[in-house]
Image: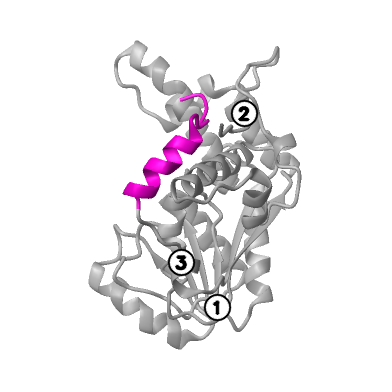
Amino acid sequence: QRNQDIYNADELDRLLGKTVITRTFEEVTGKDIRRIHQMPIPFLPEEREVYNIVLKEFYRIQREYYSSTGNSRKDALMRLIQQITLLLRISAAPDCMKEYEGETPLKEMAVVEALARWPEEVVAIGVRHTTVLDRYAAAIREYLPERPLFVVTGSTVTFAKRRALRDVLRDSQNGILLCTQQSLPSSVNFEFVNKIIIPEMHYNNAGMSQFYMRFVRYTSTEKKDLYFPIYIGSLESNLMQMVLAKEKLTMFMKGQDADMDEIYAKFGVDYDLLSTLMTRETDDEGHLRIHWGEQKIA
């Protein structure tokens, strides 16, 4: 619960060698076509302001976003989880909050600007929540009205239509697929898409890979570029660090012992991520701090 350290690593590795059979994409295909790019983004003042409202005054706005269970003890236990969830939601799209009073958030503009740099590319954008999806859809329609936009969620588009989307998206030549990560059927692949943007991360790379591997296929021949726009200094930085720590554990389970420098390089992290992390304590001003220690394998 508090760390993901591994002890007796040699013995565990010996046991795994007899029981676990896994092959990575690179081992099977003999090629490494994935390139991960980090897009560190600073908070604008109005974005920081709404973030701080949830950080410092969550007790005031909690009932606007979450209903009570009717049990004060359960409500108290849920409060921290709800606060973390809302902080991550703001990190994906600050304007999904009623308290936000600024223009189009910087992260959404960074995504729009990236799309504008690829006028002849089909691009896929994967988020986790429909409220976040709605904000990106609005930004794309406002700033890139000429680009074909295909919005897909599991609740609004039938399975048959999602399967038919493949041909329509390919024929568009420069369409934008904006979807929730879980909405794409596993039986449908989009190997012609080479640009993938993930503005809202999952809690581990395995969860996100179920989405982006719809575009990275064994038959793919072109490089696949994955982009992770991240608000620096937000709880999203902690989430990225957690993804990296879990990936180190996953690689160990697959017989690939790697240090954190290799993991950072794999995910394109070329900035000081650790210095942006929040810790778990609470200071005199009430700031939430969540600590993530360095994982140990011994």
Task: Give the numbered dot on residue 293.
Answer: 2
Q: Which residue is mark 3?
A: 25
Can you give x and y, in whole percent of width and height, for residue 96 in the image? 52, 45
- The quadrant of the picture occupied by the N terminus is top left
Left or right of 78: which side holds 57? right
Q: Quadrant of residue 39?
A: bottom right
**Disc 2 residue type (three-letter):** Gly
- Pointers 1 and 3 in contact (CB under 8 A)? no
Task: Give the numbered dot on residue 97.
Answer: none
x 67%, y 41%: residue: 47
Marks 1 and 2, how far apart at CA: 44 Å
Q: Quadrant of residue 238?
A: top right
Where 170 falls versus 163 (above or below)? below
Coloring basis for residues: one colour
Q: Which residue is mark 1?
A: 147
Q: Nearer the viewer, residue 229 or 145?
A: 229
Left or right of 12: which side holds 284? right
Can you give x and y, in whole percent of width and height, for residue 245 in the image? 56, 40
What element does badge 3 sit on?
Answer: helix
Marks 2 and 3, how far apart at CA: 30 Å
Q: Tell me, yes or no, whether the highlighted magenta stretch contains residue 210.
A: no
Q: Which of pointers 1 and 2 indicates the residue nearer the eye?
A: 2
Can you give x and y, in whole percent of width and height, for residue 249 in the image? 50, 42
- Pointers 1 and 2 in contact (CB under 8 A)? no
Number of residue marks: 3
Which of disc 3 and disc 2 is earlier in sequence?
Answer: 3
- Which residues are drawn in magenta? 1-20
Q: Nearer the viewer, residue 67 or 1?
A: 1
**Residue 98 showing in the rendered view:** no
